[in-house]
Image (cartoon, rainbow, N blue to C red):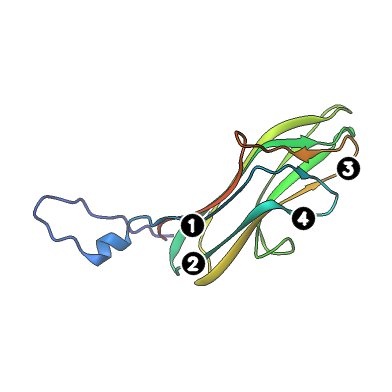
Amino acid sequence: MAINPNTTFVAGAVYTAAQANRLPFGVCASSSSTTDYTLTTTLTIATGMTATFTAIANRLYRVTYYEPAVGVTSVLSGTTTLRILLTNALGTNLQRGLIQNTAAVSSQGTLNLVHVGTFTAGSVTVVGCAITSSVTGAPILTRNVSSVARLVVEDIGPS
């Protein structure tokens, strides 16, 4: 993919719309949650992890899904998987990450997923979803006011 970098700006030069449009537009959508989410064995949108924005053709977007404390089942080799999906829990997978335990004990970790790509122009919804391989040990996504889960969409410039 060809990148269309901006020019060097100098004093007295005319700043054009084309130059302005080569800059990142910044945050397009954001959601957050401080509410714990109890994991299930069905891929489900985690509480508060939905973001909708209007995509522009031929621009790159960075979608970041951050969970501060991801619980894993106490079953040996158990997993908790997070995904960034397009539209809903049955949509196109954009990114995934998992935490797996190596002993039959509950464990916890942090996951930060990042997807960079383009979208079809128009309204786009991205969601953060979670699933666990077993509910033994009651795995949850632990959140609070100082450990906030976030889903952020940023326009990072032309593709």
Q: Where 75 sits versus 115, above or below?
A: above
Report helix, strand or loop for mark 2: strand
Q: Earlier in the sequence, mark 3 or mark 1?
A: 1
Q: Position of residue 140 (x, y in %)?
A: 78, 39
Q: Are marks 4 and 1 in contact (CB under 8 Å)?
A: no
> Residue beneath label 3, please?
134
At label 3, the amino acid type is Ser
Q: Earlier in the sequence, mark 1 or mark 2?
A: 2
> Residue beneath label 1, please?
61
Q: Are marks 3 and 1 in contact (CB under 8 Å)?
A: no
Q: Are marks 1 and 2 in contact (CB under 8 Å)?
A: yes
Report helix, strand or loop for mark 3: loop
> Residue beneath label 4, please?
44
How far apart marks 4 and 1 lie (CA) works out to 23 Å
Where residue 55 is drawn, which disc sits there? Answer: 2
Q: Position of residue 13 (x, y in %)?
A: 11, 57
At label 2, the amino acid type is Ala
- Image quadrant assignment for residue 78: top right
Instruction: Write the residue at 57% across / 67% down.
Output: 124
Q: Earlier in the sequence, mark 3 or mark 4?
A: 4
Instruction: Write the residue at 49% across / 67% down.
Output: 55
Q: Earlier in the sequence, mark 2 or mark 3?
A: 2
How far apart marks 2 and 3 lie (CA) works out to 37 Å
Which residue is at the front of the view, 57 or 143? 143
Q: Where 102 sits versus 130, above or below?
A: above
Q: Where 138 sits versus 56, above or below?
A: above
Viewer-nearest of labels 3 and 4? Answer: 4
